[in-house]
Image (cartoon, grey):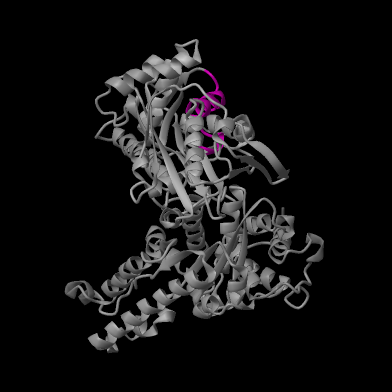
Amino acid sequence: MDNYGKLLQIMANVFEVEIGHVDENSSKETIINWDSVQQMFLIISLEEAFNVRLSDEEAVKLTSFMMIKSSLEKKGIQF
Amino acid sequence: MNDLNIYYDNLTYNEIISKVRINGGKLVGSVIKFGILGNITVDNYIPLLKYLLLKESIQADIVQGAYDIVMQEVLDLDSSISKFQPDILIVFLNIELVSPNLFQRFLELTPNEINNEKEYLLAYVHRFFEANQANIHSKVIFHLFELPTSPAFDIYEIQNGNGQRALINQINIEIIELSKSFKDIYFIDLNIIRERLGCENYLDKRYWYIGRAPFTIEAAKGLAIEQFKIVNSLYGKTKKCLVVDCDNTLWGGVIGEDGLANIRIGKSYPGNMYLDFQRQILNLYNKGIILAINSKNNESDVLEVLDNHPEMLLKRKHFACIYANWNNKAENIQNISMDLNIGIDSIVFVDDSEFECNFVKETLPRVTVIHLPLEVFNYAETISNCGCFDKIQYTDEDKIRGDLYRVEVERKKFQNSFSDLDAFYKSLEMKIVIKSVDEFSLSRVSQLTQRTNQFNLTTTRYSDDEIRSFMHSDNYDVLLLKLKDKFGDMGIVGVQILDYTIPNEARIDTFLLSCRVIGRGVERVFLRKGIERCIERDCKNIFSSYIPTKKNLLVADFYVSNGFSEISSDENCRYFIISRIEQLVSFDNYFNEIILD
């Protein structure tokens, strides 16, 4: 699976939605289930899956697919 | 660092959270209700605990109390936790938050103030245990306070011996002490989890500041494992038997090729790595775990090592049975399970060969398989940390169990030399003692109710305290049965609980026998003595029941075949009655002596 698909799968797992219901427009605004606890699950999942370390600011601010993608890209993950 | 991921089948966190959500969170099978209370955020470890329990076919139904109102949750009868009535209440009290004075302002406090703070904390914990016992009645898993890693007095701390760490350590000790006046309180030492991981890998500073969520993913994994071990032990899921391979497992090298003089075992490198591994296995033996060998070898070669190698810590006497042959290992494990009369799911199999491990895993999925790591120096830790054998309490029987089972296998061999079962039983020179439970036998009795699955008519599990309350009540008799024969003393192997709550009636609440003594007619003697006891108490009718489980089919017709009449049944239970001793089916007496205390 490419990193794009991997990120979608992770988000689908965390927010308990069908993989078809997440896309690059998904964000805290579009996913009802996206609360602070799920945010923590998301950050842990991302760090483990992409082997990166996210800062405290990122842990709080990464609340959309696009923000996550661009943050991971800055850490050398290619999409 | 030990590899926590083995417990989680090397799945990622993301895979685990999606796995524990299958069935749409619907609960099926055996369910344990957990309440989680605390002044910190612990959500990240919850999926991990659920995952570990799911592997044991236990579903966790979890309710979290409102954040940081620990005491109200147990005091208020309308709180979410009070209403939920959890089986197990898990408590996280972070000392930095519950007593900021001790943690952050330690240097500003006078000795008097420090003492007041300590007393306040102890009283708080005491009140919590008390409220739980009064209102919720849950078992409690309490996390002891973490000691500060940067103590207030820094290097001076250890010089004067009564600094911040010493104080918090003392508080932990006193909490354990005060818990003894309550029942079913168990502890986890977070400091051990932290030591295994190192502080940097234990505390997630980001989330500590973001949401008072201190545990890293590694700490969460370690924590879930510790809780899992306690739950496993409380629900009788602890494994009973360790089955080990020999070559490159108990010793280095291959005995059939290298010979006695050249296998690696002993006090110097590299034999010392295997010796340490053997020491861990011997520890398990001394804690009541049954050992068995399952090895592709000539039996004579293996026995020669066990009997004659001077450096071997494990000897022939430690193994209840030895299967050294060229059969496949799954077949051997099935034979071991039959020899020892234990379920296949209470067996743990350890081997260095990936092939053998996978073969057993696929053929016998209910066996727990441990594939030893590549590095031999990690063998010992793999066994000591495997979590399969941890028990929350130990009894005298545990210390000698390994030996009991070895003798049992000898007994079976002896039996095979008889063609007539009656003659065999008579030759055993069996002696039975039946008596009422006392303080000394109490924990073994409750242990039998916890562990016995096959010859157990109702499978009701009782704690020490429940047995004690029966013991002190006039409405109950708790009878135990001890058995001895020419091979040795088997200790307490049967329990019968009689309930006389309704006047002139008796109800056999519990009737069980350890699987080691099934099929000798012991149960008939025991049942008769119980009925006689009821009749002495003027009971006109004696009622009994059979509650079927997956494991107790063996005794489905026990009461009927002994002369009881079935009065009714539903899908969960069958009910029986007997009124006169003459209705009991008579039996051959194989016993040399029956003593009633």
Image mark count: 0
Q: Is residue B239 visible?
A: yes
Residue B369: x percent and y percent? Answer: 52, 38
Vertical position of residue B1 compared to residue B582: above or below: below
Q: Quadrant of residue B171?
A: bottom left
Q: How far across and down, in percent of the image, does residue B71 sit?
A: 49, 79
Residue B258, position as x, y percentages in the image? 35, 19
Say which quadrant the C terminus of chain B sits in: top left
Q: In the figure, is residue B268 to the left or right of B206?
A: left
Q: Residue at x 55, y 45 (%)?
A: B508
Q: Residue furthest left?
A: B160
Q: Is residue A17 above or below residue B416?
A: below
Q: x and y percent of residue B372 in the render?
A: 46, 38
Residue in the image at 48% along x and 16% along y: B422
Depth order, front residue of B68/B371: B68
Magenta residue check for B562: no
Q: Is residue A7 left or right of residue B328?
A: right
Range shown magenta: B327-346
Q: Residue at x 46, y 48 (%)?
A: B477
Q: Main secondary structure of the magenta part?
A: helix
**Is residue B214 visible to the viewer in this orientation of the structure?**
no
Say if the magenta span includes residue B332: yes
Quadrant of residue B286 within the rendered picture: top left
Left or right for B143, reference B335: left
Please identify the quarter of the rendering in which residue B254 is found: top left
Q: Nearer the viewer, residue B389 or B383?
A: B389
